Image (cartoon, rainbow, N blue to C red):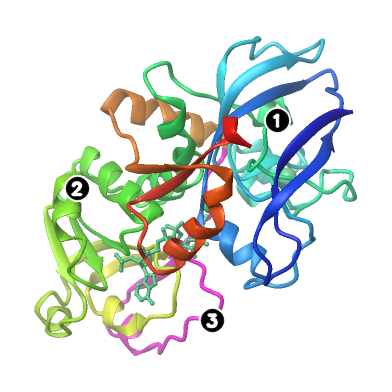
Amino acid sequence: MIKAKGIAAFSATTPLAPYSFERRDPKEHDVVIDIKFCGICHSDIHTVRSEWGNPLYPIVPGHEIAGVVRSIGSKVTKYKVGDSVGVGCFVDSCRSCQHCKDDLEQYCLQGFSGTYDSVEQDKKTQTQGGYSNVIVVDENYVLRIPASLQLDKAAPLLCAGITLYSPLMHWKAGPGKKVGIMGLGGLGHMGVKIARALGAEVTVFSHSDKKKDDALKMGAHHFVATQDRSVFKKLAGSFDLLINTISADINMADYFNLLKLDATLVVVGIPDKPLSIHPFPLVMKRRNYSGSLIGSIKETQEMLDFCAQHNITPDIELVTPSQVNEAYERVTKSDVRYRFVIDMAKV
Ligand code: NAP
Ligand code: ZN
Ligand code: ZN
């Protein structure tokens, strides 16, 4: 076994604390990765605080992992020692269902193995994530980080980046399309940068006016502070695509009314409580309400290459492992500019 050290949550209400544990010895197709950086996703916080149900403690969170290959199993062909690599939200899937065969492993019909708070495909070995110094992952679930991306800035692409890239591509954000990004946090700010690079006209919806200058600098064409409720009337019926990254309950009817006929609102934010909706605004203009989950390995690689090509990186704030609890408090107050990334060399 390989000794690992990290930080873990031991209950919903206690701060994360140092934790030593073991990773498996590499199997033939495994890659051993020295983790250099790991992003803090709001999903880590929802999970460790039991906001989505009862997780499997202790949890080493983290699914925005960037590192360097330490060693490889005897049959690994895709990576070699020293390569810059990433790991996202899942580390395996059944590999045989139709969705896995179609490069849609995030929707694996047997259930993928999440990077943490989950089990391997043996359905019993607990997985542990990236707030740690080393991880062992099958080569087919490892991503290549292009040379032009710095590892600290590449980390958030593995969840925040792909979670926005996938729906923007699926619903064809591009020239002539008016796209709205709801919530300017980790996910939202990646959405702005990617939608802009795809050629869409981008509007940010934020619940205060504090992030206006940042949003415009990131490439948004328009910024809307939603405290002023008259904006919903003014912009009614004008959007082709809205992506909801908000981690809290909001009045969905306000946003449905912003869509054109047949247009779509895609939800990616997953609050602790159900979002209530009334069918009227959907019914009245044949509007669509959909959801989207991260992206496949193939699409995540495509996204990393796209970001490298277009020079798209997140705005990050580096923290040490001992600052993670403080960072969590700031994320929950919408005070992250715009992704915390943990320097795992300091664990
Ligand atoms: P984040 O950095 O905390 O950003 C969330 C943003 O939501 C905040 O910055 C804030 O933006 C807005 N917000 C928060 N509280 C609000 C409130 N009470 N009213 C209105 N707006 C509020 O979180 P994140 O890491 O981007 O994640 C966002 C959500 O997506 C989380 O629920 C996470 O679990 C989920 N997620 C889903 C997937 C997926 O595959 N579907 C993947 C990753 C994460 P403003 O200040 O601009 O209003
Ligand atoms: Zn995430
Ligand atoms: Zn499958």
Residue 224 locus on image (x, y percent): 16, 68
Query: In this figure, which residue is indicated by the disc labeled 1?
Result: 134
**Magenta region's main secondary structure?**
loop
Front disc: 1 or 2 = 1
Magenta-tinted stretch: 268-296
288 in magenta: yes
Q: Earlier in the sequence, mark 3 or mark 1?
A: 1
| Mark 1, other Cα within 10 Å: few <14 / some 14–19 / many ≥20 | many
Residue 39 locus on image (x, y percent): 50, 44
Residue 325 locus on image (x, y percent): 56, 58
Q: Residue at x 40, y 69 (%)?
A: 333
**Disc 3 and disc 2 in contact, CB within 8 angstroms:** no
Q: Secondary structure at mark 1?
A: strand
**Residue at mark 3 to residue at mark 2: CA–CA distance:** 30 Å
Q: Earlier in the sequence, mark 1 or mark 2?
A: 1
**Residue at mark 1 to residue at mark 2: CA–CA distance:** 39 Å
**Disc 3 and disc 1 in contact, CB within 8 angstroms:** no
| Mark 3, other Cα within 10 Å: few <14 / some 14–19 / many ≥20 | few
Mark 2 CB in 8 Å range of ligand 1? no
Q: Is residue 66 left or right of residue 1?
A: left
Q: Amino acid at mark 1?
A: Val
Q: Amino acid at mark 3?
A: Pro
Q: Residue at x 77, y 39 (%)?
A: 96
Q: Nearer the viewer, residue 269 or 13?
A: 13
304 in magenta: no
Query: In this figure, which residue is indicated by the disc labeled 3?
Result: 274
